[in-house]
Image: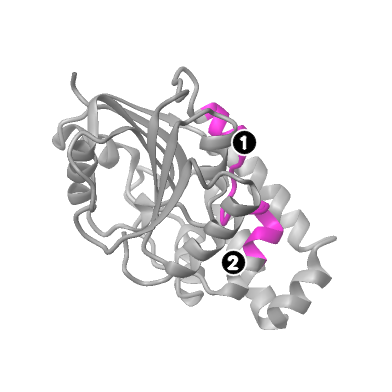
Amino acid sequence: MNANAQYDDESRAGLQRIYGTGFTSPGGLTEMTQLLDGLDLTGKDVMDLGCGLGGDSLLLAGEFGAASVISVDVDPGNLKVTSDYVADADLGHIITPTLVEPGPLPFANDLFDGVHSKAMLCHLDDLAPMFQELRRVLKPDGTFFAADWMKGERDELSQSYHDFLSNLASAGLEFFFRTPQAHADALVEAGFENVELRDATPVVEAYARNIVEQVTGNARDDLAQSLGEGGYEAMVARNQSRLNALTNGDLKFQYIKAMCPA
């Protein structure tokens, strides 16, 4: 994970107004249910890697029955929010927010039944070290399950895609989008088996369209007041360019599942 904090308190608050409490990107219960199709986490030990504001950790513990969730992030501000939400939900006996440094994970070999990540891989400048670490900390037959942003397969990507990257960079957000095939190849190289990627772009595109309608419609005044006119206009530009890139297929959203060998 990138060592730099990606969000300040203002951006955390603004993102949650759009995506819901505990979330900085589209998802929630519907997405987690689709991602976990066929995977039972009841009584399992799970790591939520790059937990952000803890929304998915709360779902893993509260809705999907994980016995323990280690919620990992490099940003202490994110983990402070996560800790507050965990306390509010009375799930401190299950969820443990844990600050880590970039690099090798501070966990023993063969520790977790599952590792989850959401929109975290796109922050890594190199997938191989992370996938090797996940392979190490997962138990035999353990599962890596993730949802993440990727780029399309075309050699020449659209201006909308490059506008989206520019808008992210202007907000101080660093992303490294790769193709679905690049993720699959890296997982196989790290020793994972039964690697499966499922395209969820149409679902996320519909969600992104709704978000654009919200931020330019009934949420406009609230967002403009909290973010300032400049911050609000930047948010609109990011969301519109993301929608455009999703619509033309140059930005994708994929579900990933991969198994450790028995």
Extent of the magenta region: 14-34
* Residue 12 x/y as whole percent: 59, 66
- Front residue of 204/226: it is 226
* Residue 25 x/y as whole percent: 56, 53
**What residue is pinned by disc 2?**
12
**Amino acid tagged 2:** Arg
Residue 182 among those drawn in magenta: no
Q: Is residue 6 visible?
A: no
* Residue 101 x/y as whole percent: 27, 64
Residue displayed at 57% across by 48% down: 55
* Residue 49 relative to residue 253: left or right: left
Element at badge 1? helix
**What residue is pinned by disc 1?**
29
Instruction: Name the N-terminal-most of marks 2 and 1.
Output: 2
* Residue 255 x/y as whole percent: 44, 34
User: Hey, which residue is sitting farthest front in the picture?
Assistant: 93
